[in-house]
Structures are given as structure tokens and as C-alpha cells.
Image: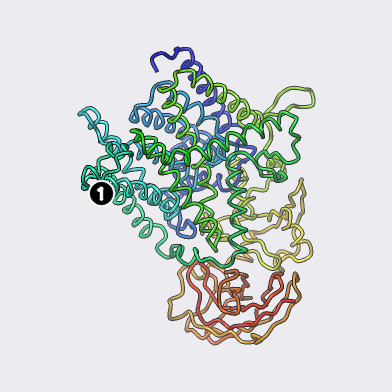
Amino acid sequence: MNKNPRMIGRLFFAVAVINILAILFYQAVTYRVFFHSDSAIINVLAGEMVRTGRFFPEEWFYGYGDVWIVYNHVFIAPLLLFFKNSFALHAASGWIFSGLLILSTIYFAKRAQLPTIATFALLATLFTGISPYVSESLFGQMSHGYAWGFLFLLLTLGAVFPPQTLSEGAKSRWHLGALAVLLFLLGLTGVRFLFSILLPLFAVLATLTCVKYLRDGAQPHQRLSYHPVFDGYHSTWLAAVIGFCSVCYGLGLVLNKLWLTETISYMNIASSLTITSFEEVATHFRLFIEGYFFSAGILLNPPSDYSLPTFHSAPIVSLTGVELIFRAVLFTWFFFLPWALLFKSAKEDNRLLFTLVLFYCFSFMLTFIFYVFSNNLAVAMPAIRYFALLQILSAVISIVFIAKLADLWGGRVWHLYFVVVVFHSLFAWQHLVGDGLTRTQNGSVAFKESPFDPLIALLREHNLVYGYASFWNASVNTVLSAGDVNIVGVTIQPDNISPFRVLASEAWYRPSFHQGPTFLLLRGEERQHMQDQLPEPLAEPSAVHEVGAFKVLVYDFNIMDKLYDGSAREPLPASERYGELSGCPAVLEMPAGQERRIALNVTNLSQITWPYRGAYPVRLGAHLLTPNGEPVQADLLRAALTANLAPGEQDSVEILLPPTEAGDYRLDVDLLQEGVAWFGNACTIRLVVR
């Protein structure tokens, strides 16, 4: 490495600085174009912390046993004492995260004893954003634990190697302290981080510990002498790292259960991994492949209003076509390199490379299993975001491998990789910078508008400050308008509008929270559904405005005066989840590909009134099974009660069967309380689809 000219190191440093500046521009300007409610919730939760004065707001619905948000709202909350809650604060929190990522990368490189040129090359590569999707996940949204999970990996992979000197020991104390805090915070996020990152890491550490333990106890002539990499590990230290991670993360997970989600059951992973049919496995496999290509920046589907740049209908002989070819080649390198190095690196004394490769292979396999063999895509959803981490991990493996090649073949290896980084950076700048800029009619360059800006301008013009919309059209407008407009998430159905109690506060829905006019925001299919069938209390708005794809229905009152039901803040006791379904036909025939409605009678046989709205409404649901009882589609449908159902009362509920492929099925219709449990007294219908 000493023979390498200093110039190439300076060039890598220059590209790294330019790429970091491009990421900062992306977080402050370009990401505003792609900003959405899942990202805006970071700001909204920070605002709720300040409003309530509680680190964990008491009435906040974290959703399905996960906090989901990690942990940029902690950076935003103090700033709210001085600034309005806006997209600028989201960008500021992104800059803080980027700074932590730079420091963690440098620390990781120093602990792993990578040469300086490799450190600059790693920073230059990471801050290309890898792909538009990875950029959005890591530097834009910064939630779901995956961005912070990567920081955790950098710290943990550094901790795998025990300190060799007193100086390293002193640094390790700070290192382990930071790792303990990060693990505790990630434990507070619930189970997602456990299955997507911590489980494969434990698999790596356990494998290394067991192999090292068995190897040390074997006779010299029986050892795996052609795998010298295992000689460099310390089994006691590895076991200590496993115990340390387990205790810190477990403490956070226990407090998650006690503080945040004490009334919500965690996902049943065992049942969610049931293989229902080969057709479903094939479908999930196709989605897995598409998702993995998408994470590499290769998306061929037509773009939508919210999608990132795609290569849909892109000619090969064009700049876009060249980028497609480049990303395909880079994706192939990133995908196959770890697998090719799995056994190769074990035969060499390179613990860092072997540990990285082993983690990548374990995490890829576990992600594949969770995604392809899950009969509930909600369990597999973390895998979609986790593709981003796999791409980043591949980039780290590539840099460590290239540093090894440079030791063997000379510094010109870095020259070739510099060319790759330059091309990668040029294509990345198109998205990180170019997608945030546009040309005006007079030819000047200006920042591009968000798709929501015309809507916000309309709402400001008519002095509309509080309203309701579906989740994806709610919080994003609150943050982009810097709080001038507050929009709360609701579930919009053709015959019902109800609070959407996920990543929201119960206080927002109480009529007393806002006194005065409100509005209902409709978009796309919602406009079609509500065209002729608004719920009766909302049938006659005082004004109607339209802008782009949005329709705004204005009312002189808070519509939650008519819609809100604050009952059922607590789940029903198990003894009160007892009712009767009548009117179920023994056999039901329906044409293939068409809907079918069935009217059923529901009787409350408990001693408590069942709520039809609120935090835990009682509803009808159904599972579609084979005649032998094997699952075909769990949670096939939902149907709401028409009103609160008192003990002994009966309600007539109509369920809508969606179009189904031809075949013989068993339909189990049952009562359930959302977020709590199924009642378990289903009526069974033989469903014949022809």
C-alpha cells in the first residue's frame, strides 16, 4: 500500500466529499419531492412529544407491537423549542445521522485496520447512496430501524475483535457503551430489528464461537488446518459479545412491552411462516427478486406519483440505458462477490472479510426465508427495507476485498476502482441532485416542487387548517406546510370513515381537540368510492375544491362530531369475546372472478357492549381454506358492525367476498376484536367457485 501514489487517495477523498455534499443536498432539497407520510411521522411524533411533555406519549398508537420510528425524532424534538415543525427539521435530523454515519465508518475502518485509501473509498461508495431506493431508506426516511441498524453493524463488527493493547481497551469501553445505548434503543422498537438484523448477527457469532470451541478441543492432526481464519478468533470474547448484545437488546425489548405496547400481542412468527401453497411461494419469490433488483436501482415498472426513478421503456442506446447496464453489472458484482468469498476467505487469515461475508450470507438466507415462505406479507415487509442493508453490506465487503487485492496486486487496483466510483457517483448525482432541480419557463434552474405543494397552497388560500385524509395524504401535508395545515389519518371506505389508529394520537380524533371547520381530503380511488356514497353525516359539504388529483370537501363543523366514538379504549376480556353468527349457508356458489355479498346475523352473547368503532372495534373477518383446512388466504375480508352492539342484541352485517379463482374452498367466518384476538366460534361455509 505504501507504493500507492498519494494522488489516488486524494482523489477518493475529493469524491467522498462531493458525494457527502450531494447527500446533504438530497436530504435538504431533493427528498422533499419524494417525502411521504411514513417519513413525516418522525416529525409528527417529535411534535407530540413536545405537546404532551412525555418521551413516550401516552395516547400514541405505535402500531402492531412495533414503535416503527427509529430515532431521528429524538433529534427533532429539541429543535421544536426554537423552530416550527417542518421539512427543514427532517433534513436537519438527516444531516445529524449522516454525520454519525461518517464517524462510525471511520471508526470501523480504524478498528479493522483498513488503509486510509480504503476508508476514503468506503465513504465515497456509501455516499453515492448505492441506489435511489437505498438513498431513500438510509438517508431519506431513516426509520424502521434499518438506517440505525447499519450503524449498529459497524459498531458490532468492530467489537468482534478483542482489544490487543491498553489503548484499544480504553477505546473499547466507549465503543461498548455506545453499542449498549444503541442496542437498548433498538430493543425499544420491537421485534422488527430482532428478525432482520440481530438474528443473523447472532447466527454469525454463534457459528464462529462453536467452530472455534470445537477446533481448539480437537487433536492437531484433526483440525481444519486449511481454514486458518478461525485461529484469529477468541471464543470467550465472541460468547461475551453475544451475551452483551442479548442483555442490552433484551432490556429494551422488555421495556417496549411494558411501556409502549402492553395491550398488543406480538406477531405470531410460527404461524406466519406456514407454507400455504406452491403458487403463493412462487408469487413471493417473484416479488423477492423484483424487490432485490429494485434495491440495486433497477426498476422496470412504470413510475407512479410517489415512485423513485425507473428504467421503464428506457432505450439501451441512451444515457439511461448506459446507467441501466452499469447498475446491472454493479448489482451482479455486489450479489455474487459475498457468495464467492464465503469459502475463499475462510482459507485465508482475514477475519474481517470472513465475518462480513458470513453475516451477509446468513442475513440473505433469513431474509429470503421470511419473505418467500411467509403467508403474511406483514411479517415479510421488513425484508423489503432490509434489501437496502444487504446492498450496503455488499459495498463494504467489496471495499475490504479490493484492499486485499491491492496488497497482492499493487495500488493500480485502486485506480480501476476509482473509475467505477466516478461512474457510480455521476449516475447517483442524477437522482441525489438532478431530481431535486427543474428548469423554469425562462430557462433558469429552480428547486422542484413536491406533488403536495399545490394542495397546500389551496388549503392556505381558503384558510383550511384542520382536516382528515388517508394515511399517505395526511402527515406529509402537515410537515410540508410547517404546521399551517394539520391533517389527521383516517380510514376511508365507501360506507364508513373512521380513525386510523396507527402512528397517531387518540387525542387528534376527539371533537374537542379542534373546534371549527374541517375538511375531508380525497384522492384517486377514494374520489370514485365517495362520488355517490358519502356517509350520511357528511353528505352535504359546505364547499368543494379540486386541485390536481385531490378533492377537498369542506364542512362548517368538526366531522369527528359525527364520526368519533371514544368507546373501547381497552380490549375486551377473554370471557366477553363470546357471540353467535347465524345465517351462514352450508354451501355457497359464486362465479369465478366476481364478487359476492352475504348477509349474516351477529348476536352479542357477552355481558359487555361491543364497540363498532374506537381503538379496538369488533368486526367480522374470514379465512379462506382448502377443504382439508389448509390456509389459502388468511384475513380474506373485514366487515364492520353497523352500531355498538349491547348484550343480547343482534345486528345484520353484510360481508363482501372478493373475486376468487375457480375451485372448492372452505370459508371460516368469525368475529374478532382488531388488534386483540379472534373469538374462535366461526361458522363454516363450503364455497364453490365456478
Look at the image and tell me whether residue 159 can be seen. no
Q: Is residue 659 above or below residue 523?
A: below
Q: Kindly indicate the quadrant of the structure image that contains residue 583.
A: bottom right
Q: Kindly indicate the quadrant of the structure image that contains residue 241.
A: top left
Q: Is residue 125 above or below residue 574?
A: above
Regarding mark 1 in the picture, which secondary structure is present there? Answer: helix
Give the side of residue 334 with respect to residue 534, left or right.
left
Look at the image and tell me whether residue 407 can be seen. yes
Picture coordinates of residue 680 (x, y %)?
50, 79
Which residue is tagged 1? 214
Mark 1 Cα-neighbour bin, 10 Å: few <14, some 14–19, many ≥20? few
In depth, the one of 462 and 189 nearer the eye is 189
Q: Which residue does the image show at 32% across and 49% down from the upper left?
A: 206
Picture coordinates of residue 258 (x, y %)?
35, 60
Q: How many marks?
A: 1
Quarter of the image with the C terminus in it = bottom right
In depth, the one of 667 and 32 nearer the eye is 667
Q: Is residue 576 above or below residue 82?
A: below
Q: Which residue does the image show at 35% across and 30% down from the upper left?
A: 112
Q: Kindly indicate the quadrant of the structure image that contains residue 295.
A: top right
Picture coordinates of residue 356 (x, y %)?
41, 39
In depth, the one of 186 and 158 nearer the eye is 158
Q: Which residue does the image show at 69% across and 73% down from the upper left?
A: 656
In depth, the one of 237 and 215 nearer the eye is 215
